[in-house]
Amino acid sequence: MSEIEAIIDELKRIHDGDAWHGPSLGEILSDISAEQAAAKPIPSAHSIWEMVSHIAVWENAFTRRLEGHPAQVSEEDDFPPVTDANEEAWRQALAHLNDSHEKFIHAISNITGERLEETAAGTDYSIRFMLRGAVRHSVYHAGQLMLLKRMHNAPPVD
């Protein structure tokens, strides 16, 4: 398996299932309601919904960089606020995450191993470093999402 194939495999597992670290993003999010997604059980932390949007924003930025565009994420766009917390909007947020992920995987599959040492557009680091960081980024947020989900399902503390 080439390095590109290994990175794609890792990202697919983190997103879709059979992840080594625990439940995949899809498994974690499969039974979350819009109300749960928008809630902030830790007031100073991001909601599940904000994190889902954040992951999608960054996968879009990584995709654009692979396509040669110096994509940056503004502070405002980094964790987009939830403006309409209904079930349809939540389904759209999940669809956006899945679409962003598919486009990212497609973009990775279009690069060659020789490009891994090239500088990622708009950055001062290599494509390899960016892709390995993307894997860690997804795993990091999967852990956060699982903890927030458990907070919703935990019995009240006396």
Image: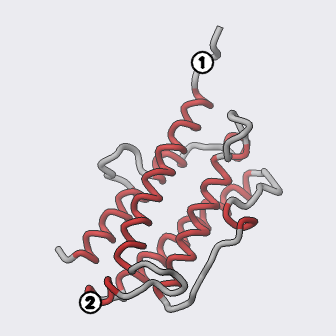
The first of marks 2 and 1 along the sequence is 2
Residue most extreme to the top: 158
Quadrant of the rendered image containing residue 43: top right
Label 2 or label 1, whichever lies nearer to me, is 2
Disc 1 marks which residue?
Answer: 155
Say what secondary structure mark 2 lies in: helix
The vertical placement of 156 against 32, above or below, is above
Q: Give the side of residue 144 with respect to residue 15, left or right.
A: right
Residue 131 at what x, y percent from top left? 39, 72
The vertical placement of 129 against 43, above or below, is below
Quadrant of the rendered image containing residue 37: top right
Q: For the residue marked with disc 2, what is the amino acid?
A: Glu
Q: Nearer the viewer, residue 74 or 32?
A: 74
Disc 2 marks which residue?
Answer: 114
Residue 60 at what x, y percent from top left? 56, 75
Residue 19 at what x, y percent from top left? 33, 51
